[in-house]
Image: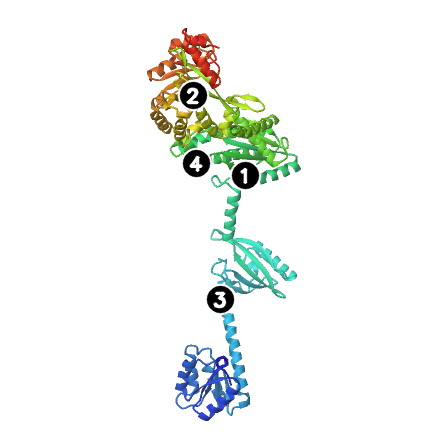
Amino acid sequence: MIDSSQEKERPVVLIVDDDEMMRMLERNSLEQAGFTVEEAADGETGLIAFQNTHPDIILLDVMMSGKDGFTVCQEIRGMHRGGTVPVLIVTGLDDLESINRAYEVGATDFILKPINWTVLGHHVRYMLRASQAFSELKDSEAKNRALLNAIPDLMFRLDKNGIFLESKGSKQIPLLLPAQDFLGKRLDEVMPFDIAQKTKHFISAAIESGTVQLFEYQLTMDNTVHFYEARIIQSREDEVLAIIRDISDRKSAEKKVIQLAYYDNLTGLPNRVLLRDRLEQAELRARRNNKKVAIMFLDLDRFKNINDTLGHNIGDLLLQSVADRIKKSLRKTDCVMREKKERMKTTVARIGGDEFTILLTDISSIHHVIMIANRLLNSLKRPFILGTHEVYITASIGIAIYPTDSEDADTLMKYADIAMYHAKDLGRNNVQFYTESMNTAAIERFNMENQLRKALSNNEFILHYQPQVNVQKGIITGAEALIRWEHPETGLVYPDAFIPLAEETSLILPIGEWVLHAACSQMRTWITRGLPFERIGINISNIQFRQNNFLEMISHTLEKTGLNPHNLELELTESCMMEQVEKSASVLRELRDMGVYITIDDFGTGYSSLSYLKRLPLNCLKIDRSFTKDIAHDPDSKSIVKAIIAMAHNMDLKVIAEGIETEQQCLLLQEYGCDVMQGYYFSKALPGEEIISLALESRDVHSGYFSLKG
């Protein structure tokens, strides 16, 4: 007995015949052969049964009443699923015309009556297997065709002589000719000669070695360059399959990656990575040809002022313009070199910020390097027109030479950098070649920076205070806080030796905050001890003043130390206040509203502009020592100091004179109406406790401030 699961797996045969005896015999034969049988007694019933039973194969008699087998077969082929089901025509007609008609209406095969019942089951089974195999083949072909159509590659079959035998086109790949027009033509008839020759070479290589050959080429069509990758694969003994892929997008992406990796995004110039690679190559050539290589580091002077004053957009425009001007200057130099039959090659790179590097290769004379450096400096002196702004800027250049200074690329770049900083130390806008002494100084500078970073956490800083004498009262009424560094190895270090480095490295920010807190705390102690001090003066660096949290830091320090804002005097330079005047004025007004006393330090050495002074909320001017030291014997200094004091008083500002060292200086300043003086004539800078003793002594002296000299 056959169970239900087996019944479902048995192929279904639909028998359509109006002869009941024939249906019975066919059923018995097919069931014994393992088929499930459905029956229909005429053509109309057979069509309905086909739609209901979905048979795997149909056994269809030709001669039936009503619709004959030919008609039924034709109608089945027009139905859903009827196009693929195998139809076996059973006929007693053995004429050729009937057989041809059976095939014309869609019969799969035919069998003649009388039927050999022994082989009927086998005939039907083999016919069903053949149909299933054919169906699977068609499905496979359809899938392969869809897969090939989905592949965006071009495919060509070529013989060993490079003649196109077959093609599969791609709408995504533009060609010089339509793909079908390639057939029967040689490579050199449809492709540029050089590409055709290259392809023929790889065809021969693929046939000889049996390995895949891969190469790239490019074609220009409609003014556009297309990049292709070709794979040549042997398909027969003397034939190959060529698979062509358009890699233009990949090449474009690779170009972008290279641009990002090796070029500066703002200026389009090579970056540090590419520069170093070219430097190494230049050194190899120079070694072979007994030539020299020069590396120039060019840094714009005071570029930060441009960013701070005009904004980063203008700063970026300036960097782009500088890059363009450097390239143009080098092209002019290159023309001069050609006239002299030199072969100097140049590379301009931007390695960060406002720093550019120029690589000069195959140098035979250092004179040419000097000429180029001076040409660059002169070129950059001309104004840059950036939107509505006319910008002037200079540059400092440091130069190192291969192999004179070093044969190592990294060391050479480091030496050029050292030379550039030396050019800045010498006043900027000049050229300096590297020397060994610069390296020694750079190492010392590096060591000092490391030591300076540790000094704050190691409590190595102290404050000394220089007394300030009120001329009218004849007593000490305040002091200026001056930082000292108690270096564990070298002893006491004065600010001139480390403050510039602290500003350059931004260490001035934590150091300045420490000074502010320590000085305010000392002033609070002096007041508590009963000293009649009005203010403690503290120098503020430009970098501190430009910090967004500057006002908050001042307010927090006053609150923490308990010092009244009226007892705090902040000393700022003219250059500090003149940068971004409106913003500076706003900060100064907030300080004044807090009660803080504002003094311009080193007055006379900077802008000295009355129009600016009127816009700033100031309390006091401090005359620079460069004027006071010569007033006793220099008429110009005397006139300048006298004018400054008069001007300040007209603007309701107090005046402090520093650097007083002689009695004559003191008397003249008193005559001119100076309000406060400080200097060695009265006292050098002293620790806080010694200031207390000095102040108490001066308060008891009735003959005036002159007795304070010590």
Amino acid at dot 4:
Leu
* Of pointers 3 and 4, the one earlier in the residue sequence: 3
Q: Which of the two marks, 2 or 4, is nearer to us in this view?
A: 2
Q: How far apart are marks 1 and 4 (CA)?
A: 21 Å
Q: Which of the two marks, 1 or 2, is nearer to us in this view?
A: 2
Q: Which of these two is toward me, 160 or 613?
A: 613
Furthest residue in direction front, as rendered: 529
Q: Distance between the residues labelled 3 and 1?
A: 50 Å
Pointer 3 local density, CA inside 10 Å: few below 14, some 14–19, many at least 20: few
Query: x, y (%) of residue 135?
Result: 50, 75
Would you say 336 lies left or right of 303 here?
Answer: right
Q: Is mark 2 on a helix, strand or loop?
A: helix
Contact (CB < 8 A) between labels 3 and 2? no
Amino acid at dot 2:
Thr
From the image, tell me which residue sits under label 2.
525
From the image, tell me which residue sits under label 1.
272
Q: What element carries label 1?
A: helix
* Of pointers 3 and 1, the one earlier in the residue sequence: 3
Q: Residue at x 62, y 65 (%)?
A: 238
Q: Residue at x 56, y 35 (%)?
A: 359
| Residue 448, above or below 180 | above
Contact (CB < 8 A) between labels 3 and 4? no
